[in-house]
Amino acid sequence: MIDHGAGRVLYEHDNPMLLAEQATAALRRRKNAIVARVAVAWFALREAIEEKTEAMMAKPIEILTHTAPQLAALA
């Protein structure tokens, strides 16, 4: 028998090999779910950072496009 720690039975069987297979399958599903959550969190964080830096970088580029002709005239 395998329980989840709070007394709830997850798997119960007389064959220990079948019980081991069920336990490894459950662990694989849990790992895949954790990896998927981490990937989604990583992409969301990356997108948020890109959005913030893009807004900050837009103004210096705009200023440069307005001042570049004057700077070229001085050279």
Image (cartoon, rainbow, N blue to C red):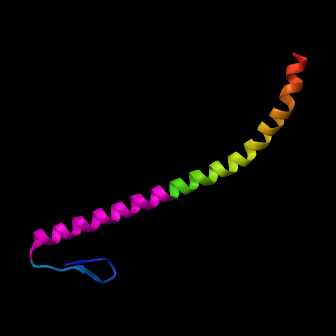
Query: What percent of the width, then of the height, locates residue 39?
Result: 46, 55
Give left or right: position of 35 versus 60. Answer: left
Relative vertical location of residue 31 with respect to residue 57 in this rendering, above or below: below
Quick one: which residue is furthest to the top in this view? 75
Residue 29 picture location, percent across and down? 31, 65
Could you say where residue 4 lies in the image, as x and y percent from the top left?
Answer: 31, 77
Q: Is residue 55 left or right of residue 63?
A: left
Quadrant where the C terminus sits is: top right
Prevailing secondary structure of the magenta residues = helix
Q: Is residue 62 magenta?
A: no
Nearer to me, 49 or 60: 60
Q: Looking at the picture, tell me which residue is in the foreground, 45 or 66.
A: 66
Along the line of sight, the residue nearer the viewer: 54 or 25: 54
Asked if the stretch drawn in magenta spans residue 33, the answer is: yes
Residue at (35, 61) in percent of width and height:
32
Residue 20 occupies quadrant:
bottom left
Q: Looking at this rendering, what residue extends furthest in the left direction?
A: 15
Q: Is residue 73 above or below residue 19?
A: above
Tell me where residue 9 appears, x and y as whole percent. 26, 82
Quadrant of the snapshot with the N terminus? bottom left
Query: Range of the magenta residues?
Result: 15-40
